Amino acid sequence: MSKDKYRAIFDIRDYISNMNLERITMDPKVMSGKPCIRGLRVTVANVLRSLAAGHSRERILEAYPYLEPEDIDACLKFAAMQADTESLEITQPA
């Protein structure tokens, strides 16, 4: 892995940490490494699709009783960060 690519990974992790996005996890063993909520098998994309479909936060929390309101906030912050990024490559350091 190039030094610049490695630095970019940690810059992104610092950015995620600074935005208070510790609830968003990426683990190759969980949902093929897609961004998930707190290591659960609930992807950020699923929550965002539910919001985009017009489902209320309450309905999402009823559908996923193990989620917390702060998890939905973290999904929205993550989406905002993604929308600001031309491309975002996240890999696990060796």
Image (spheres, rainbow, N blue to C red):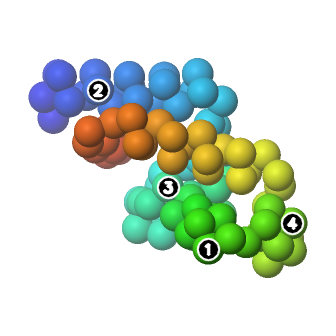
Q: Residues within 10 Å of mark 3 (few under 14, many from 20)?
A: many
Amino acid type of the residue that numbered disc 2 sits on in the rendered structure: Ala
Which image quarter holds the C terminus? top left
Q: Is residue 39 visible?
A: no
What residue do we see at 65% from left, 65% from top? 51
Q: Earlier in the sequence, mark 1 or mark 4?
A: 1
Dot 4 corresponds to which residue? 58
In this rendering, the answer to whether 24 lies above or below 22 is: below
How far apart marks 1 and 4 lie (CA) works out to: 14 Å
Q: Which mark is residue 8?
A: 2
Q: Nearer the viewer, mark 2 or mark 4?
A: 4
Q: Position of residue 59 (x, y in %)?
A: 82, 73
Q: Nearer the viewer, mark 1 or mark 4?
A: 1
Q: Earlier in the sequence, mark 1 or mark 3?
A: 3
How far apart marks 3 and 2 lie (CA) works out to: 17 Å
Q: Which mark is residue 35?
A: 3
How far apart marks 2 and 1 lie (CA) works out to: 33 Å
Q: Is residue 47 left or right of residue 29?
A: right
Q: Earlier in the sequence, mark 3 or mark 2?
A: 2
Q: Nearer the viewer, residue 85 or 14?
A: 85
Amino acid type of the residue that numbered disc 4 sits on in the rendered structure: Glu
